Image (cartoon, rainbow, N blue to C red):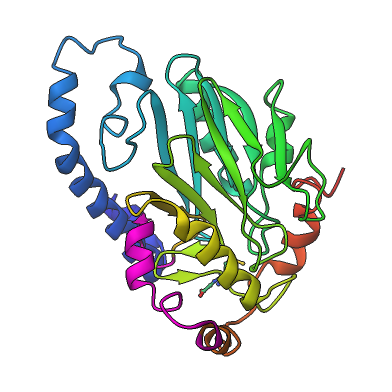
Amino acid sequence: MCSLMSRVRPVQRALAVSLQLRRNTESSKCAPAENRWSSPGVNAGADPLRTTRRFYCSRMASSKGLFFRQLFESESSTYTYLLADVETREAVLIDPVLETIDRDLKLIHELGLHLNVAVNTHCHADHITSTGLMKTKLVGLKSAISKFSGATADILLSENDKITFGKHFLTVLETPGHTDGCVSLVVDDRSMVFTGDALLIRGCGRTDFQQGSPEKLFGSIHQKIFTLPDECLVYPAHDYIGQLMSTVGEERKFNPRLTKSLDEFVNIMNNLNLPKPKKIDISVPANLVCGVYHV
Ligand SMILES: N[C@@H](CCC(=O)N[C@@H](CSS)C(=O)NCC(=O)O)C(=O)O
């Protein structure tokens, strides 16, 4: 680990160290749950979906019979989410990234999951999705994205559509503003929401390219995401400083952009002056065709 770490750039090293630290902290936080459900010997050869430490960590997944895993792609700081029904093993993958397709396929295979749908929360500008390539590797897999994204996919999503996997489902909330085709995905019991680039932790998606509109984003967050229960866990598509998750209540109270009036919010968003994402010119055209623009 030390020799590997010395070869990576300082920022990546810091991120890796912080992720390692978090992993350690997470393990200890989840230990009582693990002890409750598994003991040495009893677990040998047991079902990984039912015995993984994270599954029983209430901080990570509170819905009964729902397997949940948060995955990270370090180049674009993107979170990919894997959800599955523990009984039927049907699964959904949210915002998978081309660079990490092998990791994601390996995990799906190891856990014995049947991936029904790979969904993009919007047409990403900073990385290329793996949904198209993944379809060539997994029989029966369907891609999904908003009908307002301008992209092609097997399933074009609209408000209130359900993406089902076993007895669970995700409900589509249209949350435009970062792009016209942004959706947030709410777990059936409203315990978790995947907000894509609409709501980030103590931030939100930028509104200065594609079909960005601060007015629309403000409405989407206040009228859709902030009407979910306070305890609903918020899982965004990105975080650039290592934050993993938040809650609707926390964001409603502490998000420095969303606690402002509409006029103040518009002013903040119009003056972010962020550099363009490095891969925007290749990502957008590729993501309009599920990332498989060369075929
Ligand atoms: N440096 C990154 C791009 C960072 C960025 O612009 N992030 C977007 C989401 S991905 S399009 C964003 O909305 N950021 C909001 C913010 O307040 O930072 C790269 O070059 O890819």
In screen coordinates, is 232 left or right of 161? left
Answer with the quarter of the image where residue 277 lies: bottom right
Q: Residue 278: x, y in percent?
A: 64, 71
Residue 105 in view (yes/no): no
Magenta stretch: residue 256 in it?
Answer: yes
Answer with the quarter of the image where residue 208 lies: bottom right
Q: Which residues are magenta?
A: 240-264
Q: Within the displayed image, which quadrant is ligand 1 positioned in?
A: bottom right
Residue ID at (27%, 54%): 2
Residue ID at (62%, 77%): 214
Magenta stretch: residue 275 in it?
Answer: no
- 12 up-or-down from 234: above or below: below
The one of 200 and 12 positioned closer to us in this rendering: 200
The one of 25 and 208 positioned closer to us in this rendering: 208
Residue 279 in view (yes/no): yes
Q: Residue 271: x, y in percent?
A: 57, 90
- 226 up-or-down from 172: above or below: below
Q: Quadrant of the C terminus?
A: top right
